[in-house]
Image (cartoon, coloured by chain):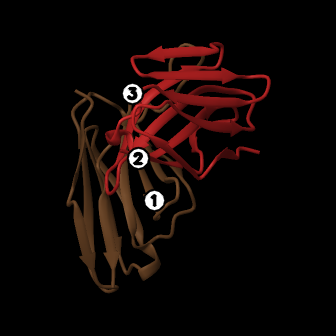
Chain colours: A brown, B red
Amino acid sequence: DTEVTQTPKHLVMGMTNKKSLKCEQHMGHRAMYWYKQKAKKPPELMFVYSYEKLSINESVPSRFSPECPNSSLLNLHLHALQPEDSALYLCASSQDGTSGHSYTDTQYFGPGTRLTVL
Amino acid sequence: GEDVEQSLFLSVREGDSSVINCTYTDSSSTYLYWYKQEPGAGLQLLTYIFSNMDMKQDQRLTVLLNKKDKHLSLRIADTQTGDSAIYFCAEKGGATNKLIFGTGTLLAVQP
């Protein structure tokens, strides 16, 4: 089973709303990722959690707040977003967030949440 | 630098072979990946290759790696309409453990 699930599939929110995106995996992975993808562009890394600790924050604005309540769950809390934050938000997981010459630590992606900010 | 480049668009006829190309700049990359993204969907891992290999075959997919030229290609044999999608190459390794994606190639398969 290489499934990563994300909810909701679609989300429309106003600039004053607070909402959350959710991601779940049951592969026993210890690393989880948030990416943002604009139309016709590659995904851009936002955050990485490894063993439930934030290990990478790619200088993301504070209106995006990640949370990793346990090793299977990853949330992204949204507050006071701007219309330019509209995008597909992808979650991914991998075994532990490390890799080397004998180990790939492949990332598996969820289907994404399509976010529209009005 | 860590730029990964791909041609934007490829059109083929159903039943033909497709070859999608990718060039990267980080010679210390350990693994290189191919992902497929259908419209409105997430990224599906297709295959990956370790940097000390020069070829990997998996059913209709063949990956070729030329490490000297930092060139990666994905060949899809007997291309079907269901193969229509955007294909991203990605590299990992080197200075960081991050996945660096290419610009993506839109493959259009004509019936």
How packed mark 3 is, by other alpha carbons closer than 10 Å (few <14, some 14-19, many 20 or more), is many
Where's the N terminus of chain B, which quadrant?
Answer: top right
Q: Amino acid at mark 2?
A: Gln
Towards the viewer: B55 or A16: B55
Q: Are marks 1 and 2 on the same chain?
A: no
Q: Of circles 2 and 3, which is in front? A: 2
- Identify the residue position indicated by label 2 in the image: B110
Q: Are marks 3 and 1 on the same chain?
A: yes
B58 shown above or below A3: above
Residue at (39, 37) in percent of width and height: B14
Q: Chain of mark 3?
A: A
Q: Quadrant of residue B30?
A: top right
A76 shown above or below B24: below
Residue at (61, 21) in percent of width and height: B64
Q: Is residue B95 visible?
A: yes
Towards the viewer: B23 or A96: B23
- Identify the residue position indicated by label 1 in the image: A37
Q: Chain of mark 2?
A: B
| Label whose residue precedes the other's in the sequence (3 or 1) | 1
